[in-house]
Amino acid sequence: MSTIKTLSGKAFLAFPEMQGLLRDELSRRLGYDVSRAQVFGDVLYCPDFPDSAELPYFASTAFLSPFRLEFSSIGEAAAELKKIQRNWAPYQYQFFRRASLIQEKLPYINLKDRKFPLEIPHSAIGIYTLTSENALIASAATTSPLPAGRLAFVEDHENPPSRAYLKIQESLSLAHFYFGVDFPHAGQKCFEAGACPGGWTWVLANLGAEVFAVDRAELAPSLMKNPLVTFQAHDAFTLKPDDVGSFDWIFSDVICYPERLLEWIKMWLSSGKAKNMICTIKMQGEIDWDLVSQFAAIPSSRVVHLNYNKHELTWIHVEP
């Protein structure tokens, strides 16, 4: 006989290897006493986490309405989940075979890596994780439409000049999902600051967009010969909008102090020459959450942590 118990608070699944940063964010940014959290692998269940509180960036997804399900068999666990809704995805950190058998009895969802470009589905997806052989915690309501909140791509190990290309693929997919903006395409102009060796430029050129790439060092040879790419050897942050013109997209994955990045972003937005922007907020030591809040406060924008980010966040702005 199965039993379901509604749990108070919320649970958060940390991005891989990011549990320390999630704990720090819950404590320093959101003021939650992390010592109260129960730990299930990379899931932090936070009893009495307030409904009014903001949600953490370093969680790939949140269990918004968590419950505990106790069951006597695999079939019973799957049947109880199916009664609640169709789509469920597991987070597995133990009892892997048992979790896989439960998933096999649930309606099919795609748990494989995706091909870029893609449409992120808007359908709801729940999450569950086994806490013992006969118990799990789950939530039908989550903050992500992706299985366990992670967007992973089929990787190209031959053509991109760096693995950074995965970050722009993910951030463009999220910009499309959150704001409905089209991917960069033929006829659009993109400006990439600090483009070397060219991972982001490679993605943009493959989408058919024209790229003005700026860095002190040249891009990969194949990109230097690409007719869609114009390269300029320069410190991109010292170029003024009036010097280079208007762009449909502006990108930066530059290693710089967040304060300087924020100033640069505001310069471009106030110029009226930037429609859409995606920039990596590189952290210098302990995260300055007050500074991050200034990025998040910019209208028509969103701060996210990507599956392919490390100790950094990504700021996405789309012209309203």
Image (cartoon, helix red, strand yellow):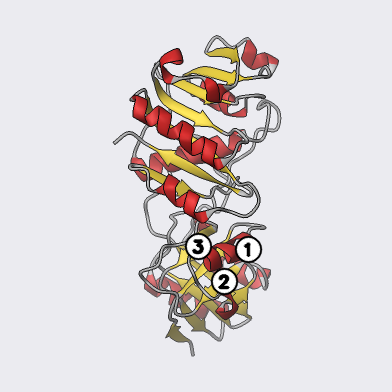
Give the residue at x 60% y 33%: 254
Distance between mark 2 and mark 1 Cα atoms: 9 Å
Circle 2: element type: strand
Circle 1: element type: helix
**Residue density around tag 2, few if under 14, some if 14–19, many if 20 or more, within 10 Å:** many
Question: Which numbered disc, 2 or 3, marks the residue closer to the eye?
Answer: 3
The residue that mark 2 highlights is: 44
The residue that mark 3 highlights is: 29
Give the residue at x 47% y 35%: 263
Give x and y (percent) for residue 96.
Answer: 67, 68
- Is label 2 in contact with label 1 (beta carbons under 8 Å)? yes
Corner quadrant of residue 277: top left
Distance between mark 2 and mark 3 Cα atoms: 16 Å
The residue that mark 1 highlights is: 19
Name the one closer to the observer, 190 or 87.
Answer: 190
| Left or right position of 258 against 163 | left
Q: Is residue 315 above or below residue 319?
A: below
Circle 3: element type: helix
Name the one closer to the observer, 105 or 5.
Answer: 5
